[in-house]
Amino acid sequence: MSTPTVYAMTIDGEAVPAASTYAVIDPATSQVAGQAPDCTPAQLDAAVAAARRAQPGWAALPLADRRQYLRATAEVIDANAAELARLVTLEQGKPLAAATGEVAGLSHWLRETAALDLSVTVNQDDADRRSITRHIPLGVVGAIIPWNYPMGQLSFKLAPALLAGNAMVVKPSTFTPLSALRLGELLRGVLPAGVVNVVTGGEELGPWLTRHPGIDKISFTGSTRTGREVMAGAAASLARVTLELGGNDPAIVLPDADADLVAERLFWGAFSNAGQICLAAKRLYLHADVYDRIAARMVALAGQVTVGNGLDEGVQIGPVSNRRQYDTVIDLLRDARDHGYEFLTGGLPDKEPDGLFLRPTLIGDPPEDARIVREEQFGPVLPLLRFHDVEDAIARANASEYGLGASVWSADPDAALAVAERLQAGTVWVNEIMHLSPLVPFGGLKQSGVGVESGQAGLLEFTERQTIVVKRRDQ
Ligand code: NAD
């Protein structure tokens, strides 16, 4: 086997090799996929300082010039998409086709966001005074990314933060740093030095970045537990925060729904990316009239799908992305087994595999207080829950500290809409799931987050409001 590539960080437009590196593990093979730098505190200081130096010049550019830079960034990503996608599959595990789509999504987000505007509100404009409120950049944004979409999660931050005139220090997940390191390298030739810096390291790097006095905003995506630590860390300097956190998204299927169609959509709505999507369906509430049919169809699908190495042709579901998450999912499976819940398909693996593969697991009607119902599984395990009365389904769906996404399925869109309006979630879909757009904001209610990403509202999260009042006439 060839020696794994050693990647460099990008600081101030330069390659910065690390004093020490750590091994990034391919979850499909447990082999080393590459070596990532372990950023030191001094290197983080250098990255923040470079961003602080670069930011005023970046913000002073006309908006049209920054738009052009975003488009040029999209072009270089497209030109290197195959390599970036392969890295995503190697470090994260998802099928190559899905990784290719993820990288295409990053350039799509850059182009669509480039078309957004930073509006100016005229508060007053008369003989006495002119008062306007405009949106100015925050300064330096620390972007902290989770491992489930190493490129996709970055797109929600990179595009609007740069358009708004901020410089950035990007910190990918410890588990999936390689694609972001390579992206940083590609951007060295595209963006002015210091505008985007990429640093990688172990679990201490996130807290260092969060508490760094040179950071004006932390844009964080990850678990609710870490989100609380980020908010506490940012409090020291009153750095602004946007937090995109965990979810336990319910899907409610009404009795008139097309059972076969819904079963297929919800199967992929739950098991795409091996279930490791914040907005995936994580609890299905199925009306008793359609429960058996949907369960049977989903069991059949689970039996047909190809689980394997994402680099192999025809693989539909890759491994769980890292050992930590695999152990979390195994723990939930053991709990379900120990409580005697019904495994309709899947379950615990017979032996410890080389790769972190799990077959899609469906659990039949566990009690509402089961851990697999109450907790975010973030893996290929799904509880199917039976209901008779829609009021009961709504109450159960809302009985969660989370409020990220939800979906309602029915042949009658108005009936579904009436249910959707009563669900406590930042996004509720009717008859589809997980549809995101660069023009539509998304974010979590309750403990699923603070603030939104994407769309005009997501762009404005990377700005401060400033009011300027010009007096026109002496009193
Ligand atoms: P995580 O919270 O463990 O890690 C997220 C990031 O934070 C990583 O880069 C990690 O290195 C860093 N980090 C860890 N400890 C930190 C600390 N104390 N301070 C600052 N940074 C720290 O999450 P994960 O396991 O990478 O991702 C899975 C979680 O992310 C799930 O809960 C999922 O629902 C959530 N998620 C949410 C969204 C959303 O948009 N709401 C999207 C994707 C994932």
Image (cartoon, grey):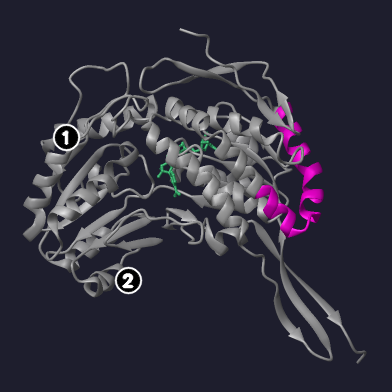
Residue 463 lies left or right of residue 371; in this view the side is right
Q: Whole-percent x and y of residue 378?
A: 33, 40
Q: Which mark is residue 304?
A: 1
Number of marks in picture:
2
Query: Foreground residue, 352 or 94?
Result: 94
Residue at image location 20% in from the left, 23% down from the top: 349
Magenta-colored segment: predominant secondary structure = helix
**Label 1 environment density (alpha carbons within 10 Å; few <14, some 14–19, many ≥20):** few
**Label 2 environment density (alpha carbons within 10 Å; few <14, some 14–19, many ≥20):** few
Q: Amino acid at mark 1?
A: Gln
Secondary-structure class at tag 1: helix
Quadrant of the image for the C terminus? bottom right
- The answer to whether one can see residue 425 in this image is no
Q: Tell me if residue 25 comes above or below residue 98 in the rendering.
A: above
Q: Which residue is mark 2?
A: 421
Q: Amino acid at mark 2?
A: Glu
Query: Foreground residue, 63 or 140?
Result: 63
**Residue 391, picture quadrant:** bottom left
Residue at image location 49% in from the left, 61% down from the top: 441
Q: Whole-percent x and y of residue 365?
A: 12, 48
